[in-house]
Amino acid sequence: MDCAKGIGLLAANGGKIGDYEGGAGHDLKPLPMMITVNTTAGTASEMTSFAVITDTARHIKMAFVDWRITPDVASMIPS
């Protein structure tokens, strides 16, 4: 889910993923429509405005926070 959010950020706004690290306040264009389907119990990333992506070069996890990365539709496959 977080990877899809990062791809959406780059598809809509260009640049590099590290350009968007941190909290809200970036002047972002709307992301393409995002539909998420959660298949396991987890972080609830399928319905939040947060994402965490690992920067392997710096050995850190980058946090992203913006209402625009909240999926448009979130669903769950029942068990």
Image (tube, rainbow, N blue to C red):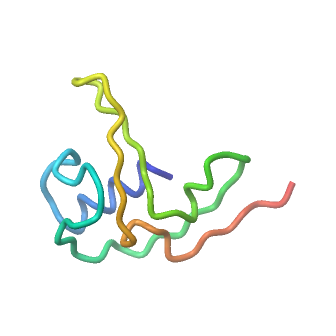
73 or 59: nearer the eye? Answer: 59
Identify the residue shown where x is 57% and y is 65%. Answer: 47
Residue 26: x %, y % from top left: 19, 65
Nearer to us in this view, 67 or 34: 67
Q: Position of residue 36 (x, y in %)?
A: 57, 64
Q: Residue furthest right?
A: 79
* Quadrant, the C terminus: bottom right
Seen at 62% across and 55% down, the residue is 44
Judged left or right of residue 1, residue 19 is left
Which of the 4 quarters of the picture holds residue 7? bottom left
- Above or below 53: residue 30: below
Q: Which residue is rendered at x = 12% and y = 54% of the image?
A: 15
Of 46 and 67, nearer the camera is 67
**Above or below — where is 16 with respect to 75?**
above
Report whether 71 appears left or right of 12.
right
The quadrant holding residue 69 is bottom left
In this picture, residue 43 sits left or right of residue 79: left
The residue located at (50%, 52%) in the rendering is 1
Residue 62 figure quarter: top left
Query: Which residue is more in the foreground, 31 or 63?
Result: 63
Image: 72 above or below 66: below
Q: In the rendered picture of this protein, how many numbered marks are placed on residues?
A: 0
